[in-house]
Amino acid sequence: MAKLNFNPQSADKREERGAMPAGEYMFSITESELKAGRKPGSQVLGLTYTCLQDGFKGRKMWQYLNIVNPSADAQRIAQSELREICEAAGLGNQVLDDSVKLHNVPMLVKIKIEKDESGQYDDKNKPVAWKPAGAAQGAAPGGFRPPVATPASPASFKAPVATPAPAAGPSQPAQAPAQQSLEPQDGSTTSTTTSPSESPAAQPAAEQPTGRPTPPWMKRAS
C-alpha cells in the first residue's frame, strides 16, 4: 500500500489512440529534429504535427524524411515532400536554414491511414500532401469548391440563336423571303418590293434611247 496525494483533475488526459479518418485537416508542425539515419552518412528530419481542427484538436502525427540518403530515390522523394511543406508554410522562396522556421505555422495537410501489415501495431496517419492554410478558406469539406459562377449559362443562351440559320438555308429561294418581309402590311405599294423584271416602269426606262431626235413619222402619228 502506498499513500498518495494525487488530484486526477490536475493531470492531463491521456492522448486518444487510433488513427484519424483520412482527409484534409489543419495542422501545424510543433517539433522537429535532425538525426542520423540507419545507413551510414544518412540524415533523417523528424517532424511532429499537432492537429488544430475541432474534434481532433491536439492529436499528434509524426513524419520522418530521409533528406540525405544513399538511395537517390528515397532522398528525392523526401526532399520533394520537404519542398511542399516549405511552400505550405510560406517559405518556398527562401533557404531553410533551421527547421524551427516551420514551427507553429498552420497548414492544410492531407492524411491517409497507414496499416501495419504484421498486425503488431495500430493503424497510424501519414501526411501525403500540404497546402497553405488559406487554401481551406471558402472550400467545402474535402477541398471541393461549389461551382458558383460557370460559363454554362451564356453558352446555353447562344445555342438556340444559332440553330434557325441552317433551317432557312438553301431549301427556299432567296427572293421569296425578301418579298415577304419587305411587303407593307397595310396594303400600300412600293417599288422596292418588286424585282426589276416585274416592274412595268423599269422596262420603258431601260429601252428608250436618250439624246436622239424623234423620227418624223412618230410626230405625224401623235
Image (tube, grey):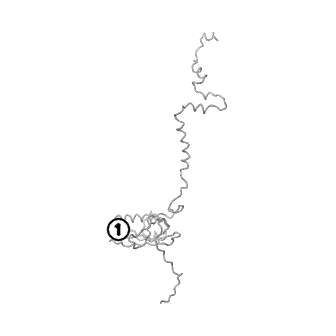
Q: Could you say which quadrant of the image residue 217 lies in?
A: top right
Q: Is residue 171 above or below residue 14?
A: above
For the point 62% across and 31% down, the residue is 183
Outermost residue, front side: 119
- In the shown orientation, is residue 181 left or right of residue 53? right
- For the residue pair 97 and 2, the one nearer the viewer reads as 2
- Which quarter of the rendering shows the C terminus? top right
Measured as percent of width and height from the top left, residue 125 is found at 44, 69
Q: Is residue 59 above or below residue 209?
A: below
Write down the residue under mark 1: 69
Mark 1 burial class by Cα count in 10 Å: few <14, some 14-19, many 20+: many
- For the residue pair 145 and 113, the one nearer the viewer reads as 113
Q: Is residue 175 above or below residue 37?
A: above
Measured as percent of width and height from the top left, residue 79 is found at 39, 65
Q: Could you say which quadrant of the image residue 121 lies in?
A: bottom left
Measured as percent of width and height from the top left, residue 46 is found at 41, 71
Q: Secondary structure at mark 1?
A: loop
- In the shown orientation, is residue 177 left or right of residue 121? right
- For the residue pair 145 and 117, the one nearer the viewer reads as 117
For the point 53% across and 57% down, the residue is 146
For the point 54% across and 52% down, the residue is 150
- In the shown orientation, is residue 73 left or right of residue 215? left
Q: How many marks?
A: 1
Measured as percent of width and height from the top left, residue 152 is found at 53, 50
Q: Amino acid at mark 1?
A: Asn
